[in-house]
Image (cartoon, helix red, strand yellow):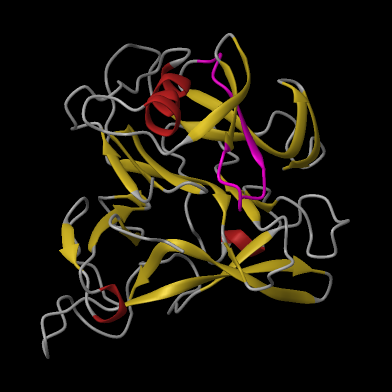
Amino acid sequence: MGVQYYSSEDAGAPVLSGQAGALTALLDACVVDGYGSKPALGWEIAFTGTDLRAYRSTDPDASGALLRVQDTGTTVAMLRGFLTMSDIDTGTFSFPTSAQAASGLYAHKSNSATSDSRAWYLVGDERAFLLATNAYSSYWSVHFFGDVIGYSPTDAAAAILLADTSNSATGYAGFDAGGMTTGSPRSRWARGIDEMTESPLLGCSVISANNQSIGYGGYCCEYPNVVDGSIGVAPIILREVVSGGAILRGQLPGIFQPLHNHGLEFGALIPGNGDLTGRNLVVVLNGASSSAIGNVIVDVTGPWR
């Protein structure tokens, strides 16, 4: 199916709100069923229940990791990954583990338990997707699930889950260079590269002036580049945090760090250049737009791999 880009602005798009089942309805539409003129990503619902889903890629090259979504609440849903599952409530190699996060990680839907709609974007391919939600005013949350680009061809569990540890309406998930290495369970690998460690911590390596957040500012240049009017981006390298250090294990597919100070308009489509010539890039905010905590650049044309 390739890379697909979905938005709350699409005709026939599902509505995200502070109601039970709103997030599973959105994910059903985007990754399984499609809507309007938009084809689905080609995933499947492996197990289901009332406002419960376990989503899995059907790509033959995928890790087979499943995303369990418990959308029985209102303003947030709970997420947990599994390498295998036998029913909607049972699985192996959970990420995060119950010890790391008793109920799982939070996906932000809305700041109020109402049917009022909230803006959202979802970009993905057959093996992974990013979901950005505007749950509260200017605050955006970025969530990611699926297979990354592993550096080892034998890494059969190069799948990650990124969400939030807070149910605060002004909390946000995102690719944070500091928070992803402090022991927070919000970013986890499905399994260690040793094939035994459960839910090891995921870290990212980025170009950062303050070691806080991708796209935070203080980088090399203004946008656009005055020499040729282009945008500069860098891959987001992923680490597995181990005792006494870290392992460079892979990188995010189709998601990049901007090499610019603030000035990138959220939601703007930007033509790619260099290795990304011929592709469209979208700016996705990570945090509060009032302070422009960070941005990531997402390739919405693909392929990602």
- Residue in the picture at 43% in, 48% down: 125
Q: Quadrant of residue 22?
A: top left
Say if the magenta span includes residue 60. Answer: yes
Between 134 and 275, which is closer to the camera in this rendering? 275
Q: Main secondary structure of the magenta part?
A: loop
**Farthest top residue in view:** 50
Q: What is the span of residues highlighted in magenta in the rendered image?
A: 57-73
Residue 201, image x and y in percent? 71, 58
Q: 76 left or right of 188?
A: left
**Farthest right residue in view:** 196
Q: Is residue 231 above or below residue 190?
A: below
Residue 225, image x and y in percent? 16, 83
Locate the N terminus by quadrant. top left
Between 268 and 275, which is closer to the camera in this rendering? 275
- Residue in the picture at 34% in, 28% down: 34
Residue 120, image x and y in percent? 31, 35
- Residue in the picture at 29% in, 54% down: 300
Q: Is residue 142 above or below residue 271?
A: above
Q: Is residue 243 above or below residue 13?
A: below
Q: Is residue 214 visible?
A: yes
- Residue in the picture at 27% in, 16% down: 116
Residue 13, image x and y in percent? 25, 25
Q: Is residue 109 visible?
A: no
Between 19 and 93, which is closer to the camera in this rendering? 93
Say if the magenta span includes residue 301. Answer: no
